[in-house]
């Protein structure tokens, strides 16, 4: 079955999805602030129970995990999603209440409308559609829905490790997905790892008069020099040994990069940048995003930044960094390499503080049957050739699922490049949502060998 660009869901499925999504986004589930966590977990569990699944709320040292299972016979599909969202700040940039679903010009707006309450709703709607067609769910499903993804999933790996036997599944549908700028469906089969650190320099006990800059070292200068030593102008990381454990691409993975249509110029325009590092385009652009590790400077803080002038020599400076990693790099080893690099280059005074334990990189086999079934389902649903990415440039807690469960993971979903995830006016296009629900349903049918 091929759906047109104007494909509509069955009325009752659409109504269910719209009401469910409006209900979920009304909870201000900001994990960074600990807001609305218990009530959102209860609401999610109730939605799963309403579909006939057995739902449980499992405590963790942080936010609870909502677990559910159900269905009859056949293979087992596990869904990973999260019910927490990013803060809505700055509120003044929103054109409508971030926690009230608002429809404008064929879009739905709200915090979490895409990431991740919209994605979760698309999975629930696909299952409801299947159940109504078959009178039951003719294969097994499991859900792991956490409440700490937006703060780094600090307790998820331990949860998956502890419950690995119960979570056993044949395949996993990940928590996000998108179309590209041309409307072609995207398939992601991996995520980069991440480790976040803070570099700190203190050169005095307190802020000094700027006249003392003639004899006292400036922490801004020291930290700037340390940062400049970490990478070159083209983005290459200069830390010795940083690339040693990077897994070479297979022939199939290299072919997948070469098959991706080049949208680098469109993306440069969308992002408002003049070009990309090293002039990257085509397969090199996507290789950098998916298969090369990178260091990124998130923020730099020191001294006076208010109106006018304040002649001060600051006592300290600090910068926040993250490293995006690829198989087979270890987050803890990268921090050790960073420390060694700073010491070797004379920056023993620069303190390294690890902010997050980090996520390991993960990548599924592009030739796995589940990957191919998902690709076929998207091809049939959209009438376009899906674009297969061996990995997203972003990070997330995929590693426990590939490592402990050994299941292939595919990320498909309802977003688009203008969804403004994590930003004011987060949105999805309603047409993308409807096609996404249909695509997930079709992928599940292929997975379970349903007609």
Image (cartoon, helix red, strand yellow):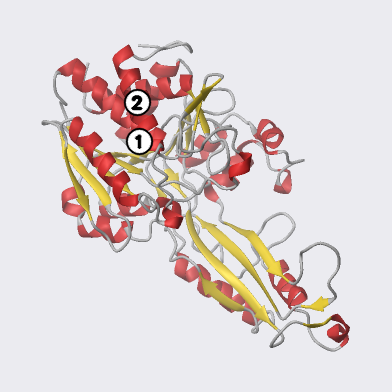
Q: How many marks?
A: 2
- Picture quadrant of residue 211: bottom right
The picture places residue 153, in percent across and down from the top left corner, at 38, 56
Observer able to see residue 385: no
User: Image check: 226 left or right of 98?
Assistant: right
Q: Is residue 58 visible?
A: yes
Vertical order, 88 against 411 (above or below): below
Left or right: residue 189 versus residue 337 is: left
Task: Using the numbered discs, state the Cα–Cα distance from disc 1 to disc 2 in whole angstroms.
Answer: 13 Å
Residue at image coords 27%, 49%? 406
The nearer-to-camera label among 1 and 2 is: 2
**Pointer 2: what residue?**
19
- Category of crowding for the residue at label 1, using alpha-carbon neighbours closer than 10 angstroms: few (below 14), some (14–19), many (at least 20): many
- Residue drawn 59% across the image and 27% down it: 181
The image shows residue 427 at horizontal and vertical percentages of 52, 31
Labels 1 and 2: the sequence-earlier one: 2
Viewer-proximal residue, 57 or 226? 57
Residue 81: which quarter of the image?
Answer: top left
Residue 112 vs residue 299, the one in the foreground: 112
Instruction: Report x, y in % for residue 11.
Output: 33, 12
Numbered disc 2: secondary structure: helix
Q: Is residue 48 left or right of residue 392?
A: left
> Which quadrant, please, contains the N terminus?
top left
Residue at the limit of the structure toward the left, as seen here: 73
Q: Residues within 10 Å of mark 2 (few under 14, many from 20)?
A: few
Q: Is residue 310 left or right of residue 198?
A: right
- According to the picture, the residue beneath numbered tag 1 turns out to be 120
User: Which residue is at 64% across, 60% downward?
Assistant: 297
Q: Position of residue 296 (x, y in %)?
A: 62, 58
Disc 1 secondary structure class: helix
Residue 206: image tag: none
| Quadrant showing the C terminus | top left
């Amino acid at each position: 079955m091929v759906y047109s660009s104007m494909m509509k869901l069955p009325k009752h499925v659409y109504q269910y999805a719209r009401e469910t999504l409006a209900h979920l986004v009304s909870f201000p589930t900001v994990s960074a602030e600990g807001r609305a966590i218990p009530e959102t977990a209860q609401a999610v569990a109730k939605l799963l129970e309403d579909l006939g699944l057995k739902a449980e709320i499992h405590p963790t040292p942080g936010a609870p995990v909502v677990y559910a299972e159900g269905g009859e016979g056949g293979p087992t599909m596990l869904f990973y999603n999260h019910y927490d969202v990013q803060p809505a700040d700055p509120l003044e940039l929103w054109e409508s209440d971030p926690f009230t679903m608002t429809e404008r010009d064929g879009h739905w707006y709200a915090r979490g409308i895409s990431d991740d309450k919209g994605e979760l709703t698309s999975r629930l709607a696909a299952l409801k559609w299947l159940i109504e067609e078959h009178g039951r769910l003719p294969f097994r499903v499991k859900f792991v829905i956490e409440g700490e993804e937006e703060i780094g999933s600090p307790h998820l790996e331990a949860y998956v490790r502890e419950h690995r036997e119960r979570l056993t599944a044949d395949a996993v549908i990940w928590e996000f997905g998108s179309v590209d700028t041309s409307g072609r469906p995207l398939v992601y089969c991996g995520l980069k790892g991440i480790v976040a650190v803070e570099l700190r320099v203190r050169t005095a006990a307190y802020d000094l008069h700027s006249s003392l800059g003639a004899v006292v070292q400036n922490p801004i200068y020291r930290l700037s020099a340390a940062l400049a030593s970490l990478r070159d102008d083209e983005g290459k990381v200069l830390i010795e040994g940083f690339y040693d454990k990077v897994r070479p691409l297979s022939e199939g993975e290299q072919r997948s990069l070469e098959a991706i249509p080049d949208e680098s110029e469109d993306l440069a325009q969308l992002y408002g940048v003049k070009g990309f590092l090293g002039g990257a385009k085509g397969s090199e652009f996507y290789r950098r995003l998916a298969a090369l590790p990178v260091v990124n400077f998130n923020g730099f803080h020191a001294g006076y930044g208010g109106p006018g002038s304040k002649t001060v020599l600051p006592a300290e400076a600090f910068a926040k960094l993250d490293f995006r990693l690829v198989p087979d790099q270890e987050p803890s080893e990268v921090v050790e390499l960073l420390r060694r690099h700073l010491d070797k280059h004379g920056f023993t005074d620069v303190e390294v503080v690890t902010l997050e334990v980090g996520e390991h990189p993960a990548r599924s086999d592009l030739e796995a049957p589940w990957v191919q079934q998902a690709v076929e389902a998207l091809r049939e649903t959209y009438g376009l050739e899906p674009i297969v990415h061996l990995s997203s440039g972003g990070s997330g807690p995929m590693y426990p699922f590939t490592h402990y469960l050994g299941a292939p993971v595919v990320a498909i979903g309802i977003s688009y490049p203008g969804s403004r995830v994590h930003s004011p006016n987060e949105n999805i296009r309603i047409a993308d949502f409807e096609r996404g629900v249909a695509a997930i349903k079709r992928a599940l049918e292929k997975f379970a060998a349903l007609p």
